[in-house]
């Protein structure tokens, strides 16, 4: 007679063997992980004094220009993407009415000057006649009334000449005003700049209230406007070095900068992507200057800095304040 153990006892034995094998596998894996070097993802990141979101800008921002006078555009002299110099013509209104006003003012000035010259001639003759009559009266050979009348004529001409001088001055001011109005019918670049946008075309009726016709990017050094969280305000100060990155990736472009000033007014966070964080966060504006040369300034080798030129106004960047400090690696205890 053959003895057969019960099935329940065999199943328990197999279960115990499986548990022992699984425990051994866990122990081996733990030992291998403790002896293996840590990967980059597990390593502690570099430490900075503060980190903030920012954007590229220039001092004063973009310049929006509109026509200073109402009228019909006769000429648009530039296009988008053009580089303009200070004083270069951007657009011009119909100048015929203003030109006619200048011609009329010039004619009025010439008339007033001729009247003043005529009075000067009359005054010289009247003074000579009055002097002769006064001498004749003194010699007893002349009429006293005639001498008095001649003196009154000289005084009257003096008054008329003063009025003529005032008329010449007024006509000169009107001419200056007419020339100024003629100048106001032309829009010129206030400084060297790049034309970003043109919203004008010949034949359009424009006015100062019709909005900007040209948007200019002044040729000024790029700056960074960072939104510093209120918890980091005390850690950042003027002159502090910073690293400006195009994004959070390690392979993105980087630029060195330093802090120019830290604002004194708290405001909402406008560069935060998360709406909830943007609604609750309070930030202070921090302005930084890039250490690289201005893109429009020549380098000592005769070239120009294209690295900064690639930074576009409004581009978002990540600003790390201070110098990176590597975290101290933990010492494992055997």
Image: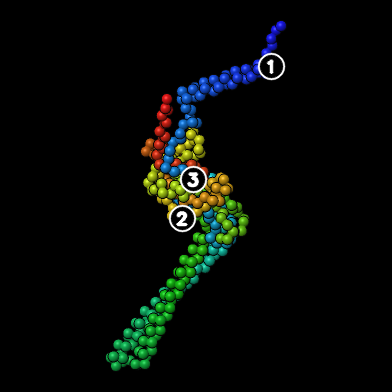
Give the foreground label among 1 and 3. Answer: 1
| Separation of marks 1 and 3 at Cα, in angstroms | 72 Å
Q: Position of residue 180 (x, y in %)?
A: 49, 63
Give the foreground label among 2 and 1. Answer: 1
Give the foreground label among 2 and 3. Answer: 2
With 154 as the anchor, is 88 left or right in this view?
Answer: right
> Which residue is under mark 1?
7
Mark closest to the chain's N terminus, 1 or 3: 1
Determine the image quadrant of residue 128.
bottom left
Q: Position of residue 157 (x, y in %)?
A: 40, 81
Is the residue marked by circle 2 packed among few (<14), some (14-19), or many (20+) residues within 10 Å? few
Mark drawn on residue 207: none
Determine the image quadrant of residue 256.
top left
Which secondary structure lies at badge 1?
helix
Is the residue marked by circle 3 packed among few (<14), some (14-19), or many (20+) residues within 10 Å? many
| Separation of marks 2 and 3 at Cα, in angstroms | 17 Å
Q: Position of residue 112 (x, y in %)?
A: 46, 73
Q: Tell me whether the residue at label 1 lies in contact with that at label 3, contact meaning CB atoms closer than 8 angstroms.
A: no
Query: Outermost residue toward the front?
Result: 1
Determine the image quadrant of residue 23.
top right
Mark closest to the chain's N terminus, 2 or 3: 3
Which secondary structure lies at badge 2?
strand
Position of residue 75 relative to residue 326, above or below, is below
Of residue 7 and residue 239, the one placed in the foreground of this image is: 7
Of residue 267 and residue 22, the one placed in the foreground of this image is: 22
Mark closest to the chain's N terminus, 2 or 1: 1
Mark drawn on residue 265: 2
Q: Residue at x 51, y 63 (%)?
A: 181
> Which residue is under mark 3?
54
């Amino acid at each position: 007679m053959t003895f057969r153990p019960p099935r329940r006892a065999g199943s328990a034995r197999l279960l115990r063997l499986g548990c022992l094998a699984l425990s051994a596998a866990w122990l081996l894996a733990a030992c291998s992980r403790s002896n293996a070097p840590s990967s980059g993802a597990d390593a502690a990141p570099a430490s900075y004094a503060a980190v903030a979101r920012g954007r590229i800008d220039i001092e004063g921002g973009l310049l929006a220009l509109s026509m200073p006078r109402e009228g019909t555009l006769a000429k648009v002299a530039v296009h988008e993407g053009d580089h303009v110099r200070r004083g270069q013509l951007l657009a011009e209104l119909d100048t015929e009415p203003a030109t006619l006003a200048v011609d009329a003012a010039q004619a009025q000035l010439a008339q007033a000057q001729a009247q003043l010259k005529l009075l000067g001639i009359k005054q010289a003759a009247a003074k000579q006649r009055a002097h002769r009559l006064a001498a004749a009266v003194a010699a007893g050979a002349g009429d006293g009334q005639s001498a008095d009348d001649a003196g009154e004529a000289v005084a009257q001409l003096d008054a008329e000449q003063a009025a003529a001088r005032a008329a010449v001055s007024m006509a000169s001011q009107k001419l200056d005003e007419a020339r100024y109005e003629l100048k106001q019918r032309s829009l010129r670049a206030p400084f060297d700049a790049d034309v970003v946008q043109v919203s004008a075309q010949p034949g359009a009726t424009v006015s100062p209230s019709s909005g900007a016709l040209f948007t200019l990017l002044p040729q000024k050094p790029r700056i960074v406007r960072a939104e510093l969280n209120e918890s980091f305000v005390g850690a950042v100060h003027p002159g502090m070095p910073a690293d400006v990155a195009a994004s959070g990736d390690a392979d993105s472009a980087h630029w060195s900068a330093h802090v120019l000033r830290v604002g004194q007014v708290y405001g909402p966070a406008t560069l935060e992507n998360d709406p909830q964080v943007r609604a609750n966060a309070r930030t202070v504006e921090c302005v930084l200057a890039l250490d690289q040369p201005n893109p429009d300034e020549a380098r000592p080798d005769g070239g120009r800095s294209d690295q900064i030129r690639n930074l576009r106004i409004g581009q978002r960047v990540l600003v790390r304040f201070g110098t990176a400090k590597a975290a101290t690696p933990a010492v494992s205890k055997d």
